[in-house]
């Protein structure tokens, strides 16, 4: 069995994406890792070249921004086309896998390798927000997505590149991995979040008010989101420790939830129920 990891990157330094941590999180179970580097306003290419791992293979492309958010799936499919593995493991630049899940994921790929009916392997999501100690499970924040696909030319990235579908239009057949995907796209300094939202508007994801383009983004009262008591992927430890808002929030959670069993067990867990959240 051969496993290809793949991702697309552009303006990584400018928008503080943890892409090196993302790549390194699954590199141990990959035989190769394809990085599609887009034309950037910073030294994204140099950053990718600095990883210095023989598994890394870099391709370069120019993004056609007139395509809107469809450019993301187009570039993702260019990276997928360069993959040579039986399975293709896709991570976006702010998505990370916990090292404790790697043996389980490798086993799942081995188990379903010769079952042609299985197109993809699915993950549960942890969307961290504002703090590394808070996650979102309210409406609008999807909780399941496929990230490992059979690399047989029948499956491709679609839409804004958050999912995959079969080229023949048939339903995608998947198996659940039981593993989390750690999404860190919304744990950034407020000024960086403002820049990222402006960029998202230019691509076509959102429509902003004028003040949203100029004012510092606000996460609001974090207490309205569920607390996370488990560990983070080891590759993220330095970033977690250096995040001041998370340090303050962690102390508040320790005080507020002193009685909570998950605090003592430190399990990697999230509530299975949607949490209604009032957005200010």
Image (cartoon, helix red, strand yellow):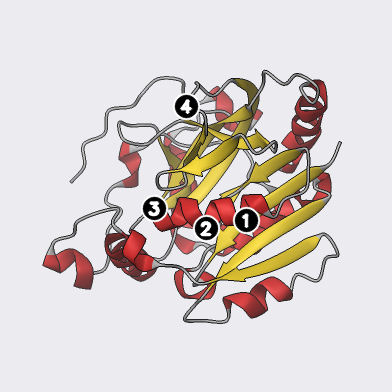
Please state which of residues 157 and 247 is positioned toward the viewer in this rendering. 157
**Image marks 1 and 3: residues in contact by CB distance under 8 Å:** no
Is disc 4 surrounded by few (<14), some (14 to 19) or many (20+) residues within 10 Å? Answer: few
Closer mark to the observer between disc 4 and disc 3:
4
Q: Mark 1 and mark 3: span between their CA atoms?
A: 15 Å
Q: Which residue is drawn at 84% across and 41% down?
A: 2
Q: Is residue 235 above or below residue 119?
A: below
Residue 47 horizontal side relative to residue 14, left or right = right
Residue at mark 4: 169
Q: Do the residues labelled 2 and 4 touch (CB within 8 Å)?
A: no
* Callouts 1 and 2 close, C-beta under 8 Å: yes
Which residue is depicted at the point 51% across and 62% down? Answer: 243
- What is the crowding at mark 1: few (fewer than 14 residues within 10 Å), some, or many (at least 20)? many
Give the Cα separation between the discs numbered 1 and 2: 6 Å
> What separation in Å lies between label 4 and label 3 (alpha carbons)?
18 Å
Q: Residue 79 carries which label?
A: 1
In the figure, 54 relative to 278: above or below? below
Q: Which mark is residue 241?
A: none
Q: Name the residue under label 2.
A: 75
Which residue is most to the left? 210
Residue 88 in the image: x percent, y percent?
A: 69, 42
Residue 80: x percent and y percent? 64, 50
Q: Are marks 3 and 2 in contact (CB under 8 Å)?
A: no
In depth, the one of 168 and 112 nearer the eye is 168
Q: Where is residue 1 in the image (x, y as percent from the top left)?
A: 86, 36
Which is nearer the N-term, disc 4 or disc 1? 1
Q: Which residue position holds label 3? A: 70
* Secondary structure beneath label 1: helix
């Amino acid at each position: 069995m051969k496993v290809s990891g793949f991702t697309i990157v552009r303006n990584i330094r400018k928008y503080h994406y943890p892409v090196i941590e993302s790549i390194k999180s699954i590199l141990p179970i990959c035989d190769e890792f394809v990085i599609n580097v887009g034309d950037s306003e910073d030294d994204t290419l140099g950053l990718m070249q600095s990883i210095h791992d023989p598994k890394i293979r870099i391709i370069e492309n120019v993004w056609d921004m007139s395509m809107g958010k469809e450019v993301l799936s187009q570039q993702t499919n260019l990276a997928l086309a360069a993959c040579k593995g039986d399975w293709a493991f896709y991570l976006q630049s702010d998505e990370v896998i916990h090292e404790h899940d790697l043996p389980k994921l490798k086993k799942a790929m081995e188990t379903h390798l010769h079952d042609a009916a299985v197109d993809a392997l699915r993950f549960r999501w942890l969307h961290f927000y504002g703090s590394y100690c808070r996650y979102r499970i309210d409406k609008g924040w999807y909780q399941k997505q496929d990230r490992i696909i059979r690399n047989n030319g029948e499956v491709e990235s679609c839409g804004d590149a958050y999912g995959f579908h079969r080229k023949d239009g048939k339903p995608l057949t998947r198996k659940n991995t039981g593993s989390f995907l750690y999404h860190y796209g919304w744990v950034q300094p407020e000024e960086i979040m403002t820049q990222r939202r402006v960029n998202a508007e230019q691509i076509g994801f959102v429509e902003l008010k004028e003040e949203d383009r100029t004012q510092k983004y606000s996460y609001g009262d974090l207490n309205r989101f569920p607390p996370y008591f488990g560990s983070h992927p080891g590759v993220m430890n330095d970033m977690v420790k250096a995040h001041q808002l998370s340090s303050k929030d962690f102390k508040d959670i320790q005080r507020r939830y002193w009685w909570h069993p998950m605090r003592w067990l430190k399990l990697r867990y999230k509530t299975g129920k949607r949490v209604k959240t009032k957005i200010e």
